[in-house]
Image: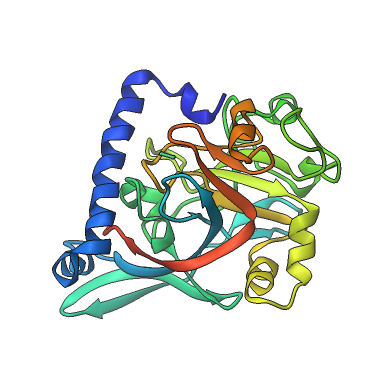
């Protein structure tokens, strides 16, 4: 079962409809030319438009691109939090808006990475929102270890991933990576940013590589732990990492599988590209 199964059916329908709208807008920009891009880059609020991103790689299925990484850091006690860039105010073509953006690991990391699938309306995506950057344990997680050891809202600690070198849950191979489901910058709001964290030897190895991918992972991970926004870039479902027996039919038993339309992703291979972020409502 994925997190998406746990939403009430009526909210699932709403998410699907919203996803269709978001996806249509994105594909419209992809093929529609300058007129559409003008709309995206001159919104009432701002912060949308063509945006470079780093994401977990999209492998198969209809999703147009990967799901964006969230750079991870530890505090002095070992609790995990997402990096949020410094906020600056910019003016473009007479429109003034805030942007949270920084150079990190050879990439331009921006809060606009998360502006798709309705998350552009999430309070936590507002650049200057005073939100909690710590990853908080999700309610009713799909992983047995997490359900036993953490309560909803608990901060997640590096030590929670003990045994990651050979953790397994019967789906795919053991020792690929130990996951946790979390929320981020979402306290006090219904528009939640769902996150998956994974600690893996593959992340540690990739961080040693002298390559674009290695440089990014080195900067965006800590102690072999990565995080990504777990919102499918197709129609906005919440996929699962090692959560479903069906994933094996799509060669995704050791990766991320979206049960809605069978998109698959590899969380251990970064993908870099440009997408059109949807404008925030502010
Ligand atoms: S929402 Fe369609 S594949 Fe994920």
- Please name the residue shown 17% across and 80% down the image: 93
- Can residue 69 be seen? no
In this orientation, which residue lies closer to the viewer: 270 or 74? Answer: 270
| Left or right of 220 in this view: 64 | left
Picture layout, residue 195 above or below residue 40: above
In this orientation, which residue lies closer to the viewer: 66 or 117? Answer: 66
- Can residue 10 be seen? yes
Picture layout, residue 140 above or below residue 274: above
Quadrant position of the C terminus in the picture: bottom left
Instruction: From the top left corner, tell me how far across and down residue 192 is, in percent.
Output: 43, 40
Picture layout, residue 267 above or below residue 105: above
In this orientation, which residue lies closer to the viewer: 56 or 97? Answer: 56
- Please name the residue shown 67% across and 52% down the image: 80
Instruction: From the top left corner, tell me how far across and down residue 268 is, in percent.
Output: 67, 55
- Please name the residue shown 57% across and 24% down the image: 1
Farthest residue in the top direction? Answer: 9
Instruction: From the top left corner, tell me how far across and down residue 118 is, in percent.
Output: 32, 45
Marks counted in the figure total 0
| Left or right of 259 in this view: 173 | right
Picture layout, residue 133 above or below residue 149: below
Report the image quarter containing ligand 1. top left
In this orientation, which residue lies closer to the viewer: 215 or 88? Answer: 215
Looking at the image, what colour scheme do you see?
Answer: rainbow
- Please name the residue shown 36% across and 55% down the image: 115
| Left or right of 200 in this view: 72 | left
Find residue 91 and report its image quarter: bottom left
| Left or right of 113 in this view: 104 | right
Instruction: From the top left corner, tell me how far across and down residue 168 is, in percent.
Output: 79, 34
């Amino acid at each position: 079962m994925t997190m998406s199964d746990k939403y009430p059916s009526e909210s699932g329908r709403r998410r699907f409809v919203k996803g269709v709208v978001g996806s249509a807008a994105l594909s419209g920009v992809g093929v529609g030319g300058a007129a559409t891009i003008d709309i995206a880059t001159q919104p009432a609020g701002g912060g949308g438009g063509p945006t470079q991103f780093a994401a977990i790689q999209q492998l198969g299925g209809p999703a147009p691109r990967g799901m964006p990484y969230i750079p991870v850091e530890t505090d002095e006690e070992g609790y995990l939090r997402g990096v949020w860039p410094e906020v600056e105010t910019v003016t473009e073509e007479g429109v003034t808006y805030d942007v949270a953006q920084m150079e990190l690991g050879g990439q331009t990391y921006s809060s606009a990475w998360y502006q798709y699938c309705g998350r552009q309306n999430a309070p936590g995506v507002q650049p200057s929102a005073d939100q909690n950057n710590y990853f908080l344990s999700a309610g009713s997680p799909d992983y047995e270890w997490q359900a036993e050891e953490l309560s909803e809202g608990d901060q997640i600690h590096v030590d929670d991933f003990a045994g990651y070198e050979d953790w397994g849950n019967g789906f795919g191979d053991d020792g690929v990576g130990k996951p946790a489901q979390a929320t981020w910058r979402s306290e006090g709001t219904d528009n939640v940013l769902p996150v998956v964290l994974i600690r893996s030897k593959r992340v540690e190895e990739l961080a040693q590589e002298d390559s674009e991918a290695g440089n990014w992972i080195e900067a965006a991970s800590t102690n072999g732990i990565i995080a990504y926004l777990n919102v499918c870039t197709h129609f906005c479902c919440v996929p699962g990492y090692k959560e479903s027996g069906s994933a094996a039919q799509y060669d995704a038993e050791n990766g991320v599988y979206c049960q809605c339309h069978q998109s698959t992703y590899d969380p251990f291979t970064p993908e870099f590209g440009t997408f059109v972020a949807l404008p925030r409502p502010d």
